[in-house]
Amino acid sequence: MKIYGHPLPEKLYQIIKDKEPDELPILTISMLRRVVPADVQIGGGAVGGLRVNNLAGIKRESAPYRLIDKQINELYGIDSSKNTGKPITKLSILDVDKSLFIAGNHDEETIALDYRNNPQIPCVRGSFISNIAEWILLADTFTEFAIKVGLLEER
C-alpha cells in the first residue's frame, strides 16, 4: 500500500489496518523512552503518549497542502523540497514531501517515517515537546522501532 507515493511498511499496515482511531495503540512515554534520548522531554499530551494513526489519519496528517506555511515550517522543523526546489539535507529538519506522519498527540509531538535516504525503507524520526523544531532519529526502520517500543515481538 502506498500513501502519497510512499510505500507503507507492511508491519505498520498490519498494526493499523481496519482500525478506528480509538482502537489504535498508544505509544506511552515509557515505551518511547526506549528510543528517545534521555535528555529529550516527552510531554505525552492528554493520552500519556502518542497515538498511532490509522490509514485515514496518516493521509490527513501527511497531506502536502497542510504543510506549506513558512512560519509553521520553522516552528515545527519541517520544510518542503518541492516548494524550495532543492533537497532538504539537514536531517534535523523533516522534508514533508518525503515523509508520512504515523503517530502524534495534541501537544504537537509527532513520529514520522522519513523516506529521504531510502524511498523503499524509511527510517523513523520524532519531534517532541522539548525539541519541537528538531527531528531526531528513533530507528533505522519501522520494524526496528516497533520491536524496541513493544508494538511487535522480536523474532
Image: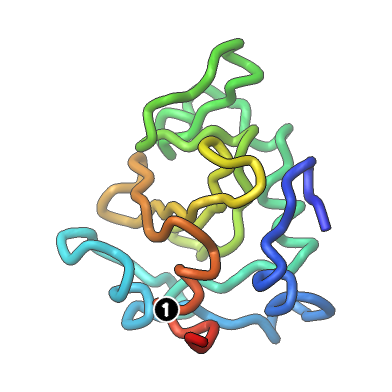
Residue 21 in view of the camera:
no
Residue position marked by numbered label 1 in the rendering: 149
Count how many numbered circles sit on residues in the image.
1
Figure quadrant of the N terminus: bottom right
Residue 64 screen position, x and y as percent: 71, 35
Q: Is residue 23 above or below residue 68?
A: below
Q: Looking at the image, which residue is at 54% across and 33% down? A: 95
Residue 147 screen position, x and y as percent: 46, 79
Residue 41 screen position, x and y as percent: 24, 63
Residue 155 in view of the camera:
yes
Q: Looking at the image, which residue is at 63% across and 16% down? A: 83
Nearer to me, 38 or 1: 1
Report the side of 20 relative to 101 (left or right).
right
Report the side of 138 relative to 50 (left or right).
left
Q: Looking at the image, which residue is at 51% across and 62% down? A: 106
Nearer to me, 48 or 117: 117
Q: Is residue 8 above or below residue 63?
A: below
